[in-house]
C-alpha cells in the first residue's frame, strides 16, 4: 500500500498535526527524515509541514531546501508525484525552485496568527480538488508575504498557477494577495495557511479537511 | 603549511523587497536624533578556503549562487578579505 510521506526537518513543528490528519482521512502516513533519501515509488503523495526548519537561518526554508531528502522530493515531483508544502513547507518548495517566487517578511513586520478568508482560483492535480469558492483557514507566519517580480505575474496567471488568494483583506502584503501557488503541471502545491489546523469543529473550522 | 584564504560574501535585500530590519533601525535612529536617509540590513558571510585565491573566489561564487543568495530577492558581492 502506498504511503503519504510527511517530511521532517530540524525545526518542523506541524508534522504531528499533518500525520493525524492523513490517518483520519484513511491514508497511511510515514515520516521522512531530512538527512535520508527515500524510495519514491513507495509514496502516493508528500507533504512538507510548517514550522521553522533550521531556525529560519539564512532565509526561511533555504537550508531545508538543500537537504538530502529534497533530492528524492525532486525526483518524485519530476515523475508527476503530488507534493504539498504548507507554510514553512511552501517556503522550502520555493527555495528549492520547485515553485515560483519567494516568501519574505510580512509587510506589517509582525508575526500574524489569525483566521483568513481565501478564494480558490486554481486547480491542483491532487490537493483541495473538492474545494470551491471561498473558504476560511488559519495562518501563523512571520515570512508570509508572497513575492514574484512584476514582470512574471501575468505568466503565472496565464499558466493557471495561482492557487489561492486572500479575500477581503491581504494580511501580509503578498503580491496580488496570493496565498498559494502551483507548479506548471499542477502536481506541486504551496500554501501559507494551515489546512491541517482546520479539520474539526473544535478547531474553529473544517474547511481544511478536504485539502487531502 | 596550509595557506588559508578568507572570502567575504555580502548579501543585500533587493530594493523592491521591504527590509524590515532596516526600517526598524531607521526609525530608531530618527528617535535618537540620528536621522539617515535610508538604512538597509543585509548579511556578511565569511568563508575560509585552503586554495589559491583564484580557486577560492571561484568556489565562493558558486556557494553564493547556489545557497547564500536568492537572486529573486537578494544581490551579492564577493571579495577577498
Image (tube, helix red, strand yellow):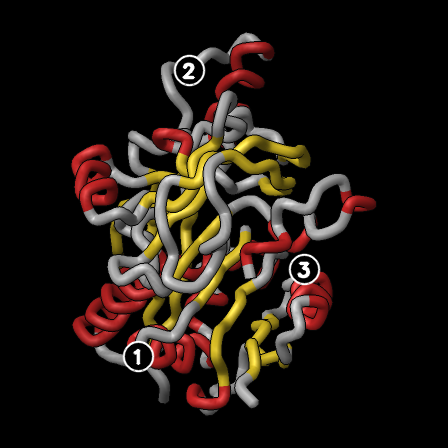
Mark 3 vs mark 1, foreground winner is 1
User: Could you say which is closer to the camera, residue B11 or residue B32?
Assistant: B11
Q: Quick check: A120 left or right of A99?
A: right
Looking at the image, which residue is at 72% across and 67% down? A24
Quarter holding the C terminus of chain A? Answer: bottom right
**Residue A8 picture location, percent across and down:** 61, 72
Q: Residues within 10 Å of mark 1 (few under 14, many from 20)?
A: few
Q: Secondary structure at mark 3?
A: loop
The answer to whether B3 appears left or right of A190 in the picture is left
Answer left or right for A112 relative to A147. right
Q: Nearer the viewer, residue A190 or A195?
A: A195
Residue B36, numbered circle: 2
Quarter where residue A29 is shown = bottom right
Classify A36 as above or below B64: below
Say which chain tag 1 marks. Answer: A
Measured as percent of width and height from the top left, residue A97 is found at 32, 61
* Chain bearing mark 3: A
Residue at the spot of label 3? A14
Residue furthest out toward the right: A202
Rendering quarter of residue A78:
bottom left
Indicate the chain on which mark 2 is placed.
B
Same chain? Circles 3 and 1: yes
Check whether the beta carbons of the residues at disc 3 and disc 2 lie within 8 A of each other: no
**Residue A52 sits in which quadrant?**
bottom right
Residue where numbered disc 1 is placed: A79
Amino acid at each position: 500500500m502506498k504511503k503519504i510521506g510527511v517530511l521532517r526537518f530540524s525545526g518542523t513543528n506541524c508534522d504531528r498535526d499533518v500525520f493525524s490528519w492523513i490517518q483520519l482521512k484513511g491514508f497511511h502516513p510515514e515520516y521522512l527524515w531530512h538527512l535520508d533519501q527515500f524510495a519514491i515509488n513507495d509514496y502516493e503523495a508528500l507533504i512538507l509541514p510548517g514550522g521553522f526548519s533550521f531556525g529560519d537561518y539564512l532565509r526561511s526554508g533555504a537550508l531545508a531546501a538543500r537537504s538530502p531528502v529534497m533530492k528524492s522530493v525532486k525526483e518524485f515531483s519530476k515523475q508527476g508525484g503530488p507534493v504539498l508544502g504548507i507554510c514553512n513547507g511552501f517556503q522550502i518548495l520555493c527555495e528549492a525552485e520547485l515553485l515560483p517566487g519567494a516568501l519574505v517578511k510580512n509587510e506589517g513586520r509582525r508575526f500574524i496568527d489569525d483566521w483568513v478568508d481565501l478564494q480558490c482560483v486554481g486547480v491542483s492535480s491532487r490537493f483541495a480538488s473538492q474545494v470551491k469558492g471561498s473558504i476560511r483557514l488559519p495562518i501563523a507566519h512571520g515570512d508570509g508575504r508572497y513575492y514574484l517580480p512584476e514582470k512574471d505575474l501575468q505568466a503565472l496567471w496565464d499558466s493557471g498557477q495561482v492557487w489561492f488568494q486572500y479575500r477581503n483583506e491581504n494580511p501580509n502584503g503578498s503580491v496580488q494577495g496570493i496565498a498559494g501557488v502551483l507548479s506548471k503541471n499542477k502536481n506541486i502545491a504551496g500554501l501559507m495557511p494551515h489546512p491541517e489546523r482546520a479539520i474539526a469543529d473544535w478547531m474553529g473550522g473544517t474547511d481544511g479537511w478536504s485539502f487531502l | 603549511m596550509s595557506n588559508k584564504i578568507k572570502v567575504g560574501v555580502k548579501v543585500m535585500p533587493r530594493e523592491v523587497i521591504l527590509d524590515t530590519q532596516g526600517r526598524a533601525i531607521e526609525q530608531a535612529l530618527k528617535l535618537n536624533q540620528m536621522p539617515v536617509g535610508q538604512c538597509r540590513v543585509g548579511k556578511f558571510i565569511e568563508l575560509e578556503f585552503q586554495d589559491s585565491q583564484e580557486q577560492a573566489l571561484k568556489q565562493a561564487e558558486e556557494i553564493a549562487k547556489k545557497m547564500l543568495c536568492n537572486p529573486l530577492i537578494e544581490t551579492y558581492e564577493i571579495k577577498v578579505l
